[in-house]
Image (cartoon, helix red, strand yellow):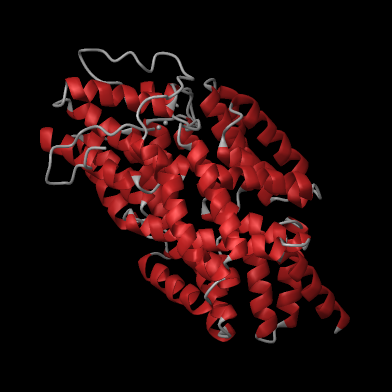
Amino acid sequence: MPPRPTDSTPERPDDDRAPSTDREPGITGEREGGTGSGAAPGPGVDQRVAALRRAADGGRRWRALHVAGCAVLLAVAVTGGAIAVGGVQDRGAGVDAVSAAGALSPGDLARGDLDAGIASLQKHLRAQPKDFGSWATLGVAYVEQARTKGDPSRYPQAQRALKRSLGLEPGNDQALAGQAALAAARHDFPGALAHAERALKQNPYNERALCTRIDALVELGRYDDAAKAADTADDRRPGIPVFTRYAYVRELRGDVRTAREVLERALNSAHAPADVAYVATALGQLAWNQGEYKTALGHYARALAADDAYLPALEGRARAQAASGERTAAVRGLEQVVARFPLPGPLVALGELYEDRGADGDRAKAGDQYALVDAWTALARAGGANTDLETAMAAADHGDKKEALRAARAEWDRRHSVHTADALAWALHVNGRDEEALPYARRATATGYRNAVFLYHRGVIERATGDERGARSRLKAALDLNPGFSPLGAREARTALEDLEGNR
C-alpha cells in the first residue's frame, strides 16, 4: 500500500466511498432547487462485521482489556474500506461517465452510488489533476462518506482535497462550501459558519453553503438567526436539503405542525430513491418524537422501500419497534446497524435494550456497546472531530461521570444549543450538583422543542431540588409525549412519577 499523502505532498485521490439532488418547488412558492442524501454499503462491510464480532467476543472474556481492544478493532472496522481498491458496486446510473470537459457535479454524484461516484472522481482526477471543481466535489464526498458511514478517517482526506482545490483556484465557492461542511461535520460550528459566509460572498446561491449556514446557527443555539437563514435559503435555493432544515428549525421552536407539513411536501416532491429515504426518515423521526410509533414505522417502511440499506431508517425503525414492545425485532435491527457502522447513538440504544432485557450475558453485552462508544470517540478525535457532546451524553449514564461533566462544560463553552444545555444539566445532576443543573435544564426546554428526554431530565432535577410539583408535571409530560423515549429512562421516569404521586 503506498503511503498516505500529507498536506505537504501532492494529493492523490484515495479510493473509497458519497449526496441526491432534484429540483423542487420552494416552501413559499413554485421555484426550483434541491439535494437529499443516501449511501450504500461498500466493500469494507465484511471487515467491519468481523472486527466488531471479535471485539464483542473479546470483551465478554476479558473486560479489563476490552476498551483498548475495541479501539484497535474499531479502527480496523471503520478504516477497512479506506485501503480497499475496486470491487465497488454501481447501484446508480451514470456515475462512471465523467466528461473530459469537467468532473461530476455534486448533484450528479449524488444521484448514483456514493462509493462508485468517488471512484469515478478519483479516476478523473488522475487524468485531470488540475480540475479544481472535482477536487472540491471529492472533498465534499469524503465528508458525506464520513457522515453516513461513521468513518472519521475521511475527514483528513476531505481536508486535503479541499485544500488542493483552493490551491488551484483560490476562493472558489465550491471548496469554501466544502470546508464549511467539513467544519460542521467535525463540530467546529463557528468555523463552519465562517466558511459558509465566505462561500456565499462568492456565490449567494451556493446550496451547500446556504444549508451549512443554517446547520451552524442551529448548533450554536442561534435559533432566530437560523430561522432567518432558512427563509433566505428557501428563497434562493428551495429543495429537499433546505426543506428538511426549515422543518427542523420549526420543530426546535415547537411548531411541529409546520415541520410536518414541510416534510410531507418535500416527500411528495421527492423522486430519487435517496431523497425519498432521506425525507421519509426525517418524518419518521418527527413522528417518533411525538410518540406516534405506528406513524413513524410507516415512514421508516417507506424509506427502506426506497433504500433498504439506509442506516438512519434502520436505526429509527428499531427504536420505534422497541417503544412499541417489539423488543426482539428492535435488538436484531440495532445489532445489524452497529455491526455495519458503530456510531454512539445506536451503540447506546442497543446497550440499553440489552440492560432492559436482562437475559444471561446481557449486562456484559451492554458493556461492550458502551466501550465501543469510547473507542469511536477516540477515533473521531484522531480525525479532527470534537466529540465532547457525544462523550457527555454517553458517559453521564454509562461511563465516567466526571468525564461527562468535563466534556459537557467544554461543549457549553463553545455553543449554547438546547442539546448542550440538556447535556450539561444532566452531567451536573449525575455528579450531585442539581441546584447548578436546574437553570440549564430549564434552558433546554425553553424554546418549545418537544423532547421527552429533556423533559425527563428536567423532572428528575426538579425532584432532586425539592420542586415536586414541577417534577410531576415534567415527568408526566415526558411520558405523555413519548412513553418509550428510552428503554431505561422511560422506566425510571415512571418509577419516579409513581413515587411522587404516592407522596401527595
Q: Is residue 381 left or right of residue 44?
A: left
The picture places residue 39, in percent across and down from the top left corner, at 48, 32
Q: Is residue 414 visible?
A: yes
Q: Residue furthest front?
A: 61
The picture places residue 292, in percent across and down from the top left corner, at 74, 46
- Residue at x 57%, y 68% (from the top left corner): 63
Q: Is residue 160 above or below residue 68?
A: above
**How many labels, in total?**
0
Screen quadrant of the N terminus: top left
Screen quadrant of the C terminus: bottom right
Q: Is residue 206 above or below residue 382?
A: above
Depth order, front residue of 100/351? 351
- The image quarter in which residue 457 lies: bottom right
- Residue at x 37%, y 21% (from the top left corner): 108
The picture places residue 55, in percent across and down from the top left corner, at 54, 55
The picture places residue 275, in percent across and down from the top left corner, at 52, 28
- The image quarter in which residue 314 lies: top right
Depth order, front residue of 420/328? 328
Depth order, front residue of 46/161? 46
Q: Is residue 286 visible?
A: no
Depth order, front residue of 180/349? 349
Q: Is residue 480 left or right of residue 222?
A: right
- Residue at x 42%, y 25% (from the top left corner): 88
Q: Is residue 104 left or right of residue 8?
A: right
Q: Is residue 301 above or below residue 101?
A: below
